[in-house]
Image (spheres, rainbow, N blue to C red):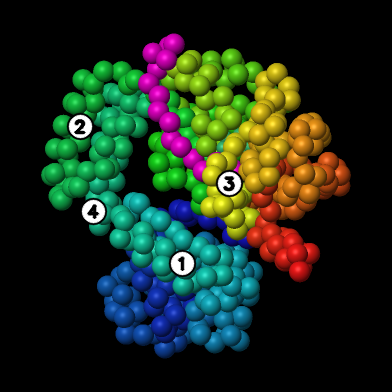
Amino acid sequence: MKHFPIFMALEGRRVVVSGGGEAALAKLRLLLKTEANLTVIASNPAPEIASWAAKGRLTLIARPMEAGDALCARLFYAANENDAEDARVADLANREGALVNIVDNLEDSQFITPAMVDRDPVVVAIGTEGAAPVLARAIKKDIEERLSPRLGLMARIGKAFRAKAEALPFGVKRREFWAEYYSKDIATSEDAKTTLDALLDKHLSAHGKEGRVDLVGAGPGDPELLTLKARKALDAADVVIYDRLVAPEILELARREAIMLSAGKEGFGPSVTQDAINEMIVSHARNGAHVVRLKSGDPTVFGRLDEEIEACEASGVAWSIVPGITSASAAVAALGQSFTKRGRNSGVRFITGHDTKGFADHDWKTLARAGEVAAIYMGKKSARFIQGRLLMHGADALTQVTVIENASRPDQRILATTLGELEPTLTQANLTGPALVFLGLAPRAALNAAQQHELEAAI
Ligand code: SAH
């Protein structure tokens, strides 16, 4: 972030604009919404500026800027639409201690003015650091459409009601009251006041809130592969308990006030024990919190979900599952392949290389057959074991095997190999991220090459 957004207190503060044409007018239209003490310095001011000055809305100095004009100014805008003059006045203002913006000159400006959606006192500022003004305008339009034109009115009346709302206990209950108020469609200030009174009565008489647990799939890593339901749950969470594999970009989407707790688990290995995680989930929910238990991929795939559900049931805590995209789905998409294919395989297995007891055992004989397809989760450490078992049960050493590390993430890697070469491929690749091993699948390009090879061999 090259520019840090802040909201500056300008009430009664001096803001100076040098320039009297279109550029100055555009800035003045924004600045006149503030309670700043405005001064315009322009030898040839536009009629609007003269008329604002006549009405006392700003002070007009009708001559070019001189040293001393920007003294005590918080902000200074150089808006002369003339590079040489802008550079001269910016230098003067700079020496006099003002923060300087030169209109349409990002490079030499100390601050920039964002695109704004104004529902005063609710103001949304949008910045792209000058990279994409078109995008900023599109976002502004989008937000304009989403925010009720009466939001400002609601917020002002809401603010005056804050003391009364303190009758509700701090935390979840008070938040719910405000959330319901801001979800209402309100027409007039009278309407807003009656609604607030009625809502306060309703919430004061409501019973203590019951906590609950959403067991949510965070997908394989790419935030765009998160479901809308998962986003909504994150938006409403009081507590988020997440696994180590959940991408940081996804954690950023949680409600800002949510308590974020790491469950530290990565498949297997050093971790908070499952019992401790169950206890964490249940105790927060019993305190009335909306807990989001965020698990990588789909929570129903190798996620010890049932143990967490049983813990909730044992404590009488309500729960629900929000499915996610499992990492194998993202990985197979990255190969440009499908899991099942007519004439090749009519089924696919999701197996784990490792379970709580160690290397997991499987029906190796079936898996060793030609045309079998399996997605092996947690297969990194168990690769040698799996390879040995399959070869022992008669699998062809040339069976295609693909390893996908960090599926759907920017650092995704695809390693196409064969069953016979799996071990050395993994050793050489030195994988650091989560990885899946696909048995019987190759990336589309490699597949074409192999088919070509077979074809040539047949001729
Ligand atoms: N519930 C998860 C799986 C949890 S088990 C899911 O549905 O994907 C953890 C294993 O998932 C890891 O060892 C790895 O094999 C796999 N995994 C998770 N995210 C992955 C990713 N982005 N790329 C490749 N494999 C991943």
Dot 3 amino acid type: Asn
Confirm if mark 3 falls within 8 A of ligand 1: no
Q: Which residues are magenta?
A: 313-330
* Residue name at image x 28 percent, y 23 percent: 167
Rendered image: mark on residue 136: 1
Instruction: Tell me which corner region of the image, top left, top right, bottom left or bottom right, holds residue 184.
Output: top left
Q: Secondary structure at mark 1?
A: helix
Describe residue 337's horizontal placement relative to residue 197 as left or right: right
Q: Crowdedness of circle 3 by 10 Å Cα count: few (<14), some, many (20+)?
A: some
Rendered image: mark on residue 345: 3
Q: Which residue is mark 2?
A: 199
Instruction: Tell me which corner region of the image, top left, top right, bottom left or bottom right, holds residue 349.
Output: top right
The picture quadrant for ligand 1 comes to: top right
| Image vertical order of residue 340 relative to residue 279, above or below | below
Q: Secondary structure at mark 4?
A: loop
Q: Position of residue 393 (x, y in %)?
A: 76, 33
Mark 4 and mark 1 lie on one chain; the one further toward the N terminus is: 1
* Residue name at image x 55 percent, y 41 percent: 347
Give the CA separation, mark 4 to mark 1: 23 Å
| Image vertical order of residue 404 relative to residue 27, above or below | above
Rendered image: mark on residue 150: 4
